Amino acid sequence: MTPATKFLDKNKCKYSILQYECDAKSDFGVIAAEKLKKPQDQVYKTLITHCDKNYVTAVIPVNTVLNLKKAAKLAGLKRLEMVKPSDAEKLTGYVCGGISPFGQKRQNITIVSDVSEIVETMIVSGGRRGLSIEIEPSSLCSLLNAKVGDITDQIN
């Protein structure tokens, strides 16, 4: 059990746990998609951004990059920048490559790519490397009071 699964259980949310061997040093989301044999637009990475003391959790498909201008607009902020990996770990209580949008130390503004509206289920980190959670996008958005919008660009 991780803080993410405890959060989902406490909120009586339906989800599935998916596990895989993770020995990667980077590209955790792409590796997860490969190991789980799932399309990359169904597997999501969790990114932590900020504007001053306002922190934003962005949940986007692993085959995209976060557009900081679009993300800031959706979050209702003037601008956003990425948080350093070590700071993201301190803020969330998770290690990079295992940051879940659920069960973070404190609830941030959460924004989700609108690509989630075209998939039946989405796969996000379950709170540690090699542990993923499959969940309906509507459940994720409802539990986290997330805003959904166009916040990504395709990887060139």
Image (cartoon, rainbow, N blue to C red):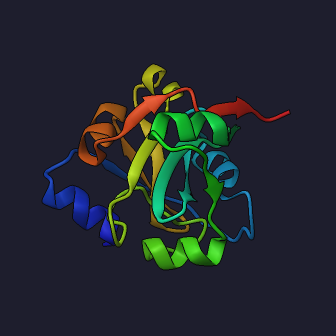
Please determine whether, in this image, residue 122 is positioned above or below residue 84: above
Decide if residue 132 is in sight here. Answer: yes
The structure residue drawn at horizontal position 50% and vertical position 79%, both measured from the top left corner, is 90
Residue 67 placed where, x, y %? 67, 38
Residue 156 placed where, x, y %? 86, 33
The residue nearer to you, when weighing 19 against 2, is 2
Q: Is residue 54 left or right of residue 154?
A: left
Residue 26 placed where, x, y %? 74, 64
Decide if residue 40 is in sight here. Answer: no
In the current view of this chain or complex, which residue is farthest to the top?
118
Assign the N terminus to one quadrant of the image.
Answer: bottom left
Q: Is residue 78 left or right of residue 110?
A: right
The structure residue drawn at horizontal position 61% and vertical position 50%, both measured from the top left corner, is 80
Residue 9 placed where, x, y %? 18, 59
The residue nearer to you, when weighing 29 against 146, is 146
The residue nearer to you, when weighing 81 against 42, is 81
The structure residue drawn at horizontal position 33% and vertical position 49%, both measured from the top left corner, is 16
In the current view of this chain or complex, which residue is farthest to the right?
156
